[in-house]
Image (spheres, rainbow, N blue to C red):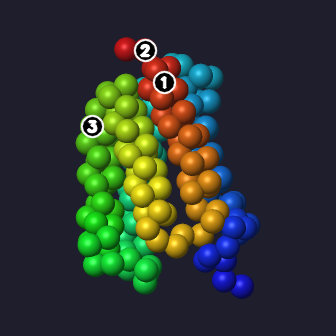
Amino acid sequence: MNHAHTDTLPGSVAWLGYGGLLPFAGTVLAIVVDPHHAYLWSDALMAYGAVILSFVGALHWGFAMNLPSLDAGRRRACFIWSTVPALMAWPATLLVPIDAGLLLVTGFLVHYWQDRRLAARARLPGWYLPLRLRLTVVACASLLSGAFLVPA
């Protein structure tokens, strides 16, 4: 069954999406229970955040290739935007935790805003934006927690 344009979140998407939050929550928990290695856990958290931010950016590349309702300008904008999250994520891996966390959170929030802009112009599944909002909130809360839990 094709769930591409329904309001029902497919079970596999739910498992994969919410399962992808485990490394966010797990590394924050590790910072709390193993403060001796807080910088290691924080680096792991920020690296995972960078990987996931790059991943969500790539969604727009897929939308640009597959959404027939996009005009040429919107399609080009999706292709261009899809590279921006990776360009924000990579330098975050080189920064101290607080700066990395703030940069990644900014990337996730701007990307969600871009998702909303795209959804206003293209037919996306009804479950997409609510899922992206929930995942974005948890990712951002984890990144900020991890950034501020590490001693300066």
Label 3 secondary element: loop
What residue is drawn where x is 43% and y is 15%? 151
Precedes in sequence: disc 1 or disc 2: 1
59 or 125, which lies in front?
A: 125
Q: Dot 1: within a 10 Å radius of its alpha carbon, few (fewer than 14), some, or many (20 or more) residues? A: many
Q: Which residue is mark 3?
A: 94
> Pointer 1 and pointer 2: residues touching (CB < 8 Å)?
yes
- Amino acid type at circle 1 is Ala
Question: What is the x, y in percent for residue 118?
Answer: 43, 63
Q: Is residue 63 left or right of residue 139?
A: left
Tell me if residue 125 can be seen. yes
Residue that appears at 42% across and 38% down: 105
Tell me the residue that label 1 is attached to.
Answer: 38
Q: Amino acid at mark 3?
A: Leu
Quadrant that contains the C terminus? top left
Residue at the location (58% across, 40% down)?
138
**Vertical arrangement, residue 38 with respect to residue 46, above or below:** above
Residue for point 69% across, 60% down: 15
Residue type at the position of mark 2: Pro
Image coordinates for residue 92, horizontal then vertical, percent:
31, 39
Q: Which residue is mark 2?
A: 151
Query: At numbered mark 1, what does the secondary structure look like: helix, strand or loop?
Result: helix
Q: Nearer the viewer, mark 1 or mark 3?
A: 3
Mark with earlier residue (2, 3): 3
* Quarter occupied by the N terminus: bottom right
